Amino acid sequence: MSDFKLTPAQHEAVYTRGRPILVSAAAGSGKTRVLTERLISLVAEGADIDRFLVITFTRAAAAELRGRILSELNERLSRDPGNRRLRRQSSLIYRAQIGTIDSFCASVVREHAHLLAVSPGFSVLDQDRSGAMRQRALDDVLDRAYETASENPGFRMLADTVGAGDSFTGAFVGSVLCGADIPAAHRTAVKVSAG
C-alpha cells in the first residue's frame, strides 16, 4: 500500500477521528482501499482489528476487505518479522466482525435468542424468497381490495390515479415492492467522498 496515494477527500476519510464518517463514492473509486487504509491506520495507532464492526453490502465485499487487511498486515509483518503486535493482528483478523448487516443482525439475534424468544437455529430469509413472499402478500391485499372496491373510495381513487387494470397493478406493485427495499432509517454522519 505504500504506493497508494490518497486524494485529499480519501485522506480525510482515512484519518478523521472522534466522529462517525460515511464514505460514499462510485464503484471502482477506491472505497475498499480507503477503508483498508483507515482500519490499518487505526491498528497502527494501537487499536485491535477485532474491536471494529465493519459492515459491507455483500459477502464478497466483506471477504475482499478481510483479505486486503490481512495482506497489508502480512506485508508489514514481512518488513518487521519480529513485531508481535502485527502477528497478533494477523490472527485477530479472523475474529473481526467484517460482514453484511444481515450477518451482523443475525449474530446479535442468535446471541440473545433466549431473551427474544427466538430459536437460535433460525435462518435469515434470502432476498429471492423474501421478494416472492412480498409479491404474494401484496397480490392478496390487492385481490381483496378489488373485491371490495365499490365500498372503498380511497382504493378506487388510487386505482384511478395510477391507472387501471393490469397497468395499475404493475405500476402500483412495482412502486410498493421497490419502496420496501429503501431503508426506513438513516444514521447521521459526516459524509466524506472517497474519490
Image: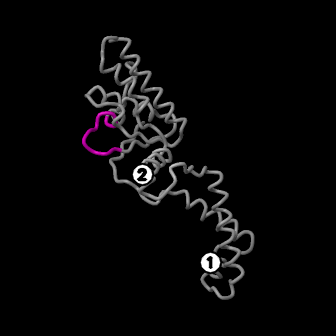
SS assignment at label 1: helix
Q: Position of residue 101 (x, y in %)?
A: 47, 46
**Magenta extent:** 12-21
Give the class, few, some or many, for how many residues have Cα within 10 Å of label 1's Cα (few <14, many ≥20).
Answer: few
Residue 148 position (above or below residue 12) = below
Q: Label 1, on which residue? A: 158
Label 2 or label 1, whichever comes before in sequence order = 2
Q: Label 2, on which residue? A: 112
Is 118 placed left or right of 73 in the picture?
A: right
**Real-space CA distance between mark 2 and mark 1, rounded to the nearest whole angstrom:** 43 Å
Residue extending furthest bottom? 151
**Is-magenta flag for residue 167?**
no
Q: Position of residue 168 (x, y in %)?
A: 69, 71
Q: Nearer the viewer, residue 166 or 146?
A: 146
Which residue sits at x=61%, y=51%? 127
Q: Position of residue 185 (x, y in %)?
A: 42, 59
SS assignment at label 2: loop
